[in-house]
Image: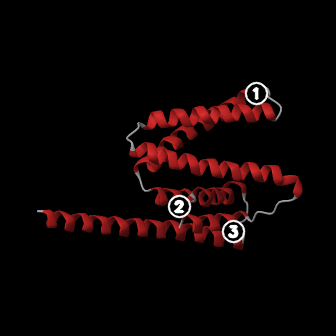
Amino acid sequence: MVLFGFIGVVIMLGPTIGPHEYYAAVVGLAAGFFTANATTFVKKLGMLHEPETRIIFYLVLVGAICGLIGTFLTGGFHPWSVKGALYILGLCICATGGQFCLTRAFSRGNLVLSSSLQYTVILFSTILGEILFLEPATFPVLCGMLIIVFSGLMSSYFVRRENKFLKEKAKTSQSKTA
């Protein structure tokens, strides 16, 4: 279902790239790859009962190091305005809260369900784009949104069905041993 949701995202975004955009495309694909790896590690650390604050600390540390490398590769720092600094502060506060929620979902919850539902970020950003910036939602965008919603619903259904099966299996194995 995660792959099905990703197909919905691809349909919504309708990527077309030219030769001058290959570098950006590789950066985007690398970001997706490393995000998938980080998600897997967060799940493993959660299974080992590592505290969320420690997990987030190291995610932020690695992200800051990568960000600094990217900053120096693209020309270094630029002066900030007060307005820009306030925007960045708000972004940091919201991102930290979101990261706590994602870390808890990925470390304690079902990885497939959390991954599928994470695609709804694109759905909500499209709706906000329609409301705030008057960006029209085209037919492929609406189709992609429906695929994402369907993927999330099906993931939820399959997770519930699997949990029910595992509970019944545990119940029957306990009654056999008793």
Residue 63 versus residue 45: which sits nearer the camera? 45
The picture places residue 31, in percent across and down from the top left corner, at: 67, 48
The picture places residue 32, in percent across and down from the top left corner, at: 65, 52
Which residue does the image show at 56% across and 59% down from the upper left?
120
Given the current orientation, which residue lies at the most extreme front position?
Answer: 177
Q: Number of numbered discs present? A: 3
The picture places residue 109, in percent across and down from the top left corner, at: 41, 53
User: Disc 3 designates what residue?
Assistant: 11
Q: Amino acid at mark 1?
A: Trp
Where is residue 12, by image quadrant?
A: bottom right
User: Disc 2 designates what residue?
Assistant: 116
Where is residue 110, by image quadrant?
A: bottom left
The picture places residue 13, in percent across and down from the top left corner, at: 71, 63
Mark 3 Cα-neighbour bin, 10 Å: few <14, some 14–19, many ≥20: some
Q: Amino acid at mark 2?
A: Ser
- State how far apart marks 2 and 1 are (Cα): 37 Å
Where is residue 89, by image quadrant?
A: top right
Say whether marks 3 and 1 touch (CB < 8 Å): no
Which residue does the image show at 37% across and 41% down from the upper left?
49
Q: Helix, strand, or loop for circle 1?
A: loop
